[in-house]
Image (cartoon, grey):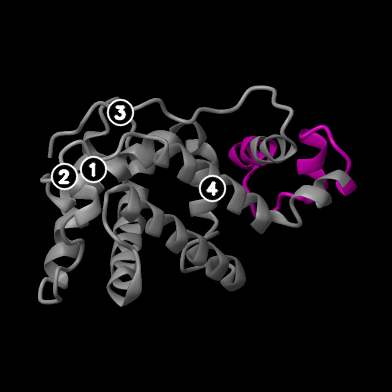
Amino acid sequence: MARKPPGKAAGKAGKTSDPVDRIVDAALNLAGERGWRGLGLSDIAGAAGMTLAELYRHCRGKGAILDAFRRRIDAAVLAGPAPADPEEGARDRLFDVLMRRFDALKPHRDAVAALWREGTGVPFGDPLAALAGLCGLARSMAWMLEAAGISSSGLLGWLRTKGLSAVWLATLPIWLKDGSEDLAATMAALDRNLKRAEGALGSLPRWPFGRARPADSAA
């Protein structure tokens, strides 16, 4: 599947006055260097240039820091262009949106690799962390559906969100190993996984992704 030129990726923030951004940047940098599971909140506070009490006022735990990171990536993807062609297939639109998400994650690949390796936010490792991570993932994937012009509402939207979450989790480890400039292996895996998700539940009405909503088509 051909890929549209990527938009500007969300890179590592420089010095920022926003305390949550400082906390997230510090946590990601430390995670990339030292791993995530053994990382202490006091370590993150020190790297962010604030006291532990200041960190507590803005992020009450490592889970909150990860949520802030996810919201940053979500916002970077959502700031990209809407589907240019409402007649474009849903799978193509989702392909573009998820590749945009990989572009946004690229500056933080080492941190994401540590999170994946240690089982944070995926269905293994610390059960509580995994549960929280999967809930956050589902929320992000619902927004990715909407970015592609596909409703995430109702039972069908819930099924779409589950399907897209599975696609993301199946493609992420390929991206982590893909050192190529054009991300050819990642694109191939994502295209393959989207096709599988589409075929696995093809008997459901308008599954998995359907067409653009009438409002989107009229825009």
Task: From the image, state whether disc 2 or disc 4 is nearer to you.
Answer: 2
Is residue 154 in the magenta section?
no
Alpha carbons under labels 1 and 4: distance apart: 26 Å
Magenta stretch: dominant secondary structure: helix
Alpha carbons under labels 1 and 3: distance apart: 22 Å
In primary-sequence order, the first of circles 1 and 4 is 4
Alpha carbons under labels 4 and 3: distance apart: 20 Å
Q: Position of residue 190 (x, y in %)?
A: 23, 48
Q: Which residues are magenta?
A: 26-53
Does residue 210 lie above or below 84 as drawn?
A: below
Q: Amino acid at mark 1?
A: Ala
The kind of secondary structure element at disc 4 is helix
Q: Residues within 10 Å of mark 1 (few under 14, many from 20)?
A: few
In primary-sequence order, the first of circles 1 and 2 is 2
Q: Position of residue 76 (x, y in %)?
A: 46, 37
Alpha carbons under labels 1 and 2: distance apart: 9 Å
Task: From the image, state whether disc 1 or disc 2 is nearer to you.
Answer: 1
The kind of secondary structure element at disc 1 is loop
Alpha carbons under labels 3 and 2: distance apart: 19 Å
Q: Quadrant of the N terminus?
A: top left
Q: Residues within 10 Å of mark 2 (few under 14, many from 20)?
A: some
Q: Is residue 49 left or right of residue 10?
A: right
In which quarter of the view is residue 200 placed?
A: bottom left
Q: Which residue is mark 2?
A: 86
